[in-house]
Image (spheres, coloured by chain):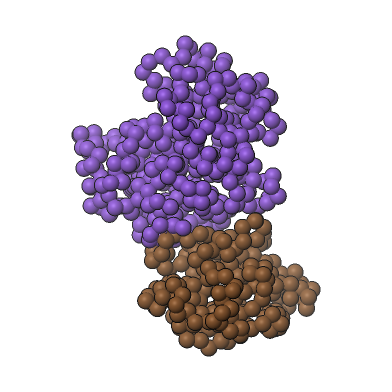
Chain colours: A purple, B brown
Amino acid sequence: MKPHLISAADLTRQDALLVLDTADELSRLSDRPIKKLPTLRGRTVVNLFFEDSTRTRISFEAAAKRLSADVINFSAKGSSVAKGESLKDTALTLEAMGADGVVIRHSASGAPHRLAGWIRGSVINAGDGSHEHPTQALLDAFTIRRRFGRRSGTPSRGGTGEGLDGLRVTIVGDVLHSRVARSNVWLLHTLGAEVTLVAPPTLLPVAVDTWPCSVSYNLDASLPKSDVVMMLRVQRERMHTAFFPSVREYSRRYGLDGVRLRQLPDDAIVMHPGPMNRGVEIAADVADSPRSTVVEQVSNGVSVRMAVLYLLLGGSGEAQ
Amino acid sequence: MTHGVSPADRHPDSAGDMTGDEDRQDSKVVLERAEISRALTRIAHEIIERTRGAEQVVLLGIPTRGVPLAERLAAGIRQVEGAHVPCGSLDITMYRDDLRLRPARTLGETLVPADGIDGKTVVLVDDVLYSGRTARAALDALNDLGRPRAVQLAVLVDRGHRELPIRADYVGKNLPTSQQEMVRVLLAETDGEDAVLLGHAAGHPAGAIRRTAPGAGADTAGRDR
């Protein structure tokens, strides 16, 4: 494994399976009376968040604390960034404080990549602009494997060592602004799944034809052929022009409601990276249905991030 | 283990990195199948004797090879006493004292029997006792899982060279070794055959690591680090 986790495309199949298998083992920790391991004692993890986040920041914080690391939370609001400090100067400050790992979220695509060139510690991308969000993709893959691994006769382990070969995953919605979609396309492809993107043409990135996936504009045609449907949030805060005529029309054509849910195969699952716009891309009754893995995704997030922190910071040299 | 990956694959760094053929060339067999079986039968009897019928006993094997050994001991106890002894595994990777000296390792499986370990007599089971560092880590790991009434240690081979004040309660065979030698336990469940091999680590890359950093934690030579 590389010393940093910047892009899901950097992970080989072997790396990805190592993370998922490690997360599987670490997920058992939540059943124990003492939910803590001494592994990262004396190591410092900095959560560097230039953009708002609840789920991801809390998830990383919980993961680092369960591994006994010291956690420093940094948010751009109320820091010297508000006074105009550059990313580089912030990085040098962190370096001087001896951060072993930096978890960064930034509105600019590529910020984690730049940061990795300035500091010695491991950099973990927790979302950069509309580029990537690799740990979200890993926790999505983990959730899918847990749900579908059970079918293959390994009840307790949820498919350890297995990839997602042959599973059909449909990612629906605002692909253009979605770092989750980009990371998922790469990772799920690496793990052997067949990925289809469904979105209005205006919400697809320019070079989408170079991605390892197929593209469709028609949700109803794709649903019966899907084992997993991943709904993306319509990121209105990043939309400065009109990408679709109205929210209502978007919801009609690309939203997942109860009627569309019934078109899915019987064991298919519905995922959403959160936060959800109920009534826009996903109807409330679908979000709360037993097929929805939204809550599972959040709790799996802690295990997966523990695995990533352990594999990047737990030893010296690259994890094998 | 209930999954498809063989334990040797999951632990590329823990003594499972040599093929049987390589092993055989310059190493000698110190325990054969029948002797291993006799040693385990004796240990099973000793456990019954010292724990008064093996009531309230939980066997926890340390991956990789401690786990099948624990299962065999449980079967042995069941044969003699008719008592069902719960059996599980305890991975110690996250508690090792040499984590920072090597790349992050693949985790083994921790499976604690449903009744837990509180108030029980836990017998830790491992293949080779060497420096005692694995046993120390296992004690730390147990501490986070509950509060056993007592903890005992059973090993198939005790090869000496302790670096910590730890001793085994049940020993299959005491095997005097030099630190340049390496002990390999092969079990049918993980390696396709039962045997304990003694060979020279010289020339083997792991042996080189072991010599340049004594006590530092390259574990290929002894498993117990």
The foreground one among A142 and B12 is B12
The foreground one among A312 and A113 is A113
Q: Quick one: quadrant of the N terminus of chain B?
A: bottom right
The foreground one among A262 and B74 is A262
Residue at the far top: name it. Answer: A245
Task: Name which residue lies at 59% across and 43% down.
Answer: A164
Pinpoint residue B140: horizontal percent, then vertical percent.
49, 67
Pinpoint residue A184: horizontal percent, then vertical percent.
49, 36
Q: Is residue B224 left or right of residue B76?
A: left
Q: Is residue A258 left or right of residue B53?
A: left
Task: Name which residue lies at 23% across and 52% down.
Answer: A96
Task: Name which residue lies at 69% across and 47% down.
Answer: A152
Q: Where, by quadrant of the figure, is residue A91 drawn?
A: top left
Q: Where, by quadrant of the figure, is residue B119 drawn?
A: bottom right
| Relative to A96, residue B191 above or below | below
Residue A52 visible somewhere in the drawing:
no
Pinpoint residue A15: horizontal percent, then vertical percent.
48, 51
Task: Name which residue lies at 36% across and 38% down.
Answer: A105
Residue A163 visible somewhere in the drawing:
yes
| Relative to B90, residue A223 above or below | above
